[in-house]
Amino acid sequence: MRWLAKFIYFKLLGWKIVGNANFSKDKIKKAVIIAVPHTSWHDFYIGLCLRKITRVKTNFIGKKELFTWPFGYYFRAIGGRPIDRTGGQNKVEQIAKLFEGEDEFRLTLAPEGTRKKVEEWRTGFYYIAKAAKVPIIMFTLDFKNKQNKVSEPFYPTDDIKADFEFMQDFFKGVEGKRKAYS
């Protein structure tokens, strides 16, 4: 199926991978991967193709109700992990614990938290990376230039303002599928 992903990604869609094309997978087994901008459902199949082409095992989280029969087995098989989203839960701590006991765990998140236009990113991904003591790897969903630009691993410091400026600079000028939401 990798050949099909390559055909779709490179030939049919005309996309390319720029930068850290293998997501440092040989040296970084655990990371928080952030995808920006997340503006459309089209981001999903671009991400799936990229994952198959680079052979990088990635994970995602979803509400625990999604992981019941009949789809639960499938979601787990493709890297999904259930979380309890009921009130009173420390979700950052709960998600950071997912990294424990795993030899390889790369959690992919969209810092916007939605496909709509946002003025500020949510901070959960940042605190998850800090709590799990893992780097953040950034990649673009740039439909204007038809490319996924991938950063080197970035380890969050204790200066959230400077860290967010650094990360947001990586995504400057990037346009999602829905330009108005970028």
Image (tube, rainbow, N blue to C red):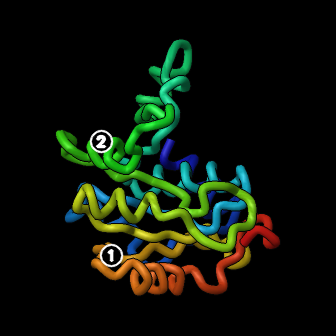
Report which residue position mark 1 lands on: 154
Q: What is the secondary structure assignment of the residue under circle 1?
A: loop
Q: Which residue is mark 2?
A: 98
Disc 2 crowd, CA 10 A, few/some/many (<14, 14-19, 20+): some
Residue 116, given in percent of the width and then of the height, sits at 74, 60
Res 84 quadrant in image = top left
Q: Secondary structure at mark 2?
A: helix
Residue type at mark 2 is Leu
- Is residue 48 shown left or right of residue 29? right
On the image, the x and y values in percent for residue 101 come to: 17, 39
Q: Quadrant of the C terminus?
A: bottom right
Name of the residue lying farthest toward the top: 69
In this view, 169 is above or below 93: below
Q: Is residue 41 above or below residue 20?
A: above
Q: Is residue 161 above or below residue 181?
A: below
Residue at 73% over, 76% down: 144
Q: Residue at x 48, y 27 (%)?
A: 64
Q: Residues within 10 Å of mark 1 (few under 14, many from 20)?
A: some
Identify the residue at horizontal 60%, vertical 56% (top origin): 113
What is the x, y in percent for residue 143?
Answer: 70, 70
The amino acid pointed to by label 1 is Phe
Q: How many marks?
A: 2
Per the rendering, the mark at residue 54 is none
